[in-house]
Amino acid sequence: MSDCIFCKIVNGEIPSSKVFENEHVLAFLDISQVTKGHTLVIPKLHNENIFDMNAETARNLFEVVPQIANAIKQELKPLGMNILQNSGKHAGQEVFHFHMHLIPRYESGDGFG
Ligand code: 5GP
Ligand code: ZN
């Protein structure tokens, strides 16, 4: 999708702070982190949202989520993590390329100290 921000991140046309990458999946820091280490995990293939995703893409994506979550946990030592996904405008989706939010949670505040 030529006008998709996240496709541009996958293609390297827009810079991002990469957290993880393999053949199918890219994870990068959210440009507006709600807490320290707020990360987005996306399939490299353009899928609009959960309603537009086949099982193989879902498997490729979910397969690496625990690994990404644990890498964040090891580096930033959060005490917990929220994993969220917004599908559809009415659910708060603003970027229409599927992404999961990994939001580390700290004892108090946003972790930026
Ligand atoms: P949504 O509301 O669609 O679930 O979340 C979209 C997320 O994408 C937001 O948290 C927003 O900060 C993030 N975002 C939007 N544009 C960019 C960008 O160009 N780079 C990065 N790294 N994150 C972005
Ligand atoms: Zn896209």
Image: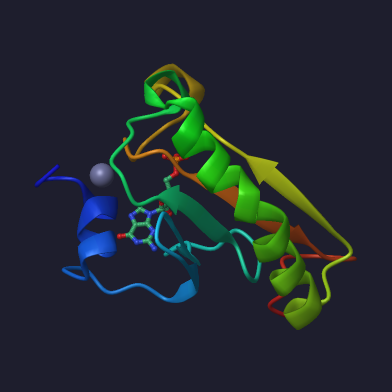
Question: Can you tell which quarter of the image residue 57 is in?
Answer: top left
What color scheme is it?
Answer: rainbow
Quarter of the picture containing the N terminus is top left
Q: Nearer the viewer, residue 5 or 67?
A: 67
Quarter of the picture containing the C terminus is bottom right
Please tell me which residue is depicted at 74% across the width and 82% down the height of the picture.
75
Please tell me which residue is depicted at 44% across the width and 50% down the height of the picture.
42
Q: Is residue 48 left or right of residue 22?
A: left
Please tell me which residue is depicted at 42% across the width and 64% down the height of the picture.
31
Give the vertical position of 99 relative to 41 (above or below): above
Place of residue 89 in the rendered image (x, y in percent of width and height, measured from the top left): 38, 22
Give the vertical position of 104 relative to 37 (above or below): above
Q: Is residue 78 left or right of residue 40?
A: right
Q: Is residue 87 left or right of residue 6?
A: right
Q: Is residue 107 left or right of residue 23?
A: right
Place of residue 71 in the rendered image (x, y in percent of width and height, measured from the top left): 71, 73
Question: Can you tell which quarter of the image residue 69 is in?
Answer: bottom right
Please tell me which residue is depicted at 9% across the width and 47% down the height of the picture.
2
Give the vertical position of 84 relative to 64 (above or below): above
Counting the numbered discs, the total is: 0
Give the vertical position of 96 relative to 107 (above or below): above
Place of residue 47 in the rendered image (x, y in percent of width and height, measured from the top left): 33, 34
Please, which residue is most extreme toward the left here?
2
Q: Nearer the viewer, residue 75 or 89?
A: 75
Place of residue 103 in the rendered image (x, y in percent of width and height, measured from the top left): 67, 55
